[in-house]
Amino acid sequence: MKISIAFAGLVIALLPTAVAQADTADDCHVGAYRLTDGRVIDISPSDPNPLRWRAFNGETGALRKNADGTWTSTFGWTGRPDGKTVSFSDCATGDMRFAGTSGHRIDFDVAETAFESNGTMLVGRLILPKGIAAVPIVVLIHGSEDNSAMRFHQLQRLLPAEGVGTFVYDKRGTGASGGSYTQDFDLLANDAVAAMREARRLAGARAGRVGYQGGSEGGWVAPLAANRAPVDFVIVSFGLAVNVLQEDQEELALEMRLKGHTPEETAKALEVAHAAEAVAESRFTTGFAEFDAVRAKYKSEPWYKDVHGNFTYMLLPLTDAQLHGDLPIKKMVAATPFRYDPMPTLHASTTPQLWILGAEDLEAPSAETSKRIKLLIGEGRPFTLAVYPGAEHGMTEFEIGPDGERVSTRYAQDYFAMMRDFARDGRLHGTYGKSTITRGKAN
């Protein structure tokens, strides 16, 4: 994915991550395949390309269909050819050929379901490795995106291909689930608990260790859910241990530093951010005069064009009439808990947690969160922290394009394996790619 700095933890992530439906003619190719050399390749719907492949080692590429029925791959999200060609047999056969190596679609035990949470019907899917043995199950809590997790969440097949079951569900107001989209962490945590209970019910005797994996916004939701009903583990990917307003401020300050601005200029930029945040936090009811004043004060400064943050930049160009008008963002932030402090929840947790962060995450800056998780580890909490150098939001590595934008190239090495091992064993083993791991006493 080409990374633009967006409110990925919350509101603005809805805009760039809204995903068009893939070409339905090719939906039958979607699935996990095991190659004859043992590698696992997952094929999923994608946008703007019909399909995307992901290897369990983190390599990935987009697929475009050729006139002869084969598919050409491009490197990561760069759009550059990577020399790989993919072909599929008829869908009933389930064979593929990936870059010269044959493979076959993996069969899973799959159960589709609908379940109720807080008066709303949600839809979900349990995916287990074939067999009768008990297996760990990861309940997938997706982030602030408004697409269907059941359609697009890549972990739903990658983990079962490695012996770990998954339960994926469309959160309220997305996909086939009922209700209205919300960023109410409290309500979303209740939904996650309901999903976990449904996963246990469906799995029956096959349910081994059961826990959550939450990415981005899911990093606020998963620990809340774990404190409400017992689970065996929590995995947080590129999440935050700070509140929503602090996320905006941390991103803005990091961006200003990376663009070479002085501490004094950053302080002024944060003054702009505080005024924008006040308007958003008021649900667009107050703070307009103060916001107008600070914009007028600094708009001619050379650094002003670089003021961004997670959502501050969205408000900067809006006129007073627009701020008072019917903005889509108003509905999105209606239930956002801007000052929710995750630390009391984390302090109260007795559930083993794995936090996986990218050191170069602009959308959810990881420095303060990493510091806080290390403090919890130092206090004897059963937490493990893994930080990947060179990794961005989404745990992807990236390159810088000609326009100065980050362009993702692959997932961090062993990121998927790290989640598999923690779900399966409750701890990590040895090294995982380039990550630096801080282990708690129990690990």
Image (tube, rainbow, N blue to C red):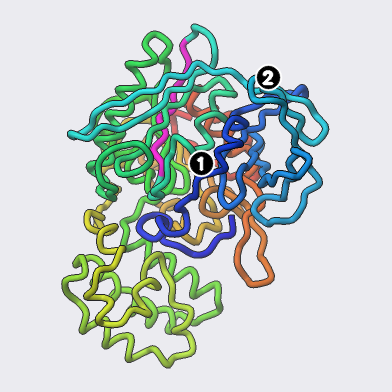
Magenta segment main secondary structure: strand
Q: Which mark is residue 112?
A: none
Against 400, residue 23 (above or below) is: above
On residue 93, which mark appears?
A: 2
Measured Cα–Cα span from mark 1 to mark 2 = 45 Å
The image quadrant that residue 85 belongs to is top right
Q: Does residue 140 belong to the magenta stretch?
A: yes
- Residue 373 in view in this figure: no
Mark 1, secondary structure of its residue:
strand
Q: Amino acid at mark 1?
A: Thr
> Dot 1 corresponds to which residue?
438
Look at the image and give the residue range highlighted in magenta.
Answer: 134-142
Type of amino acid at the residue the image marks with label 2: Thr
Q: Position of residue 360 (x, y in %)?
A: 55, 58
Q: Mark 1 or 2, which is nearer the eye?
A: 2
Residue nearest the observer in this picture, 406 or 330: 330
Q: Position of residue 32 (x, y in %)?
A: 61, 28
Residue shown at the point (74%, 56%) measured from the top left:
80
What residue appears at the point 68 percent right and 57 percent down from the top-left corner?
78
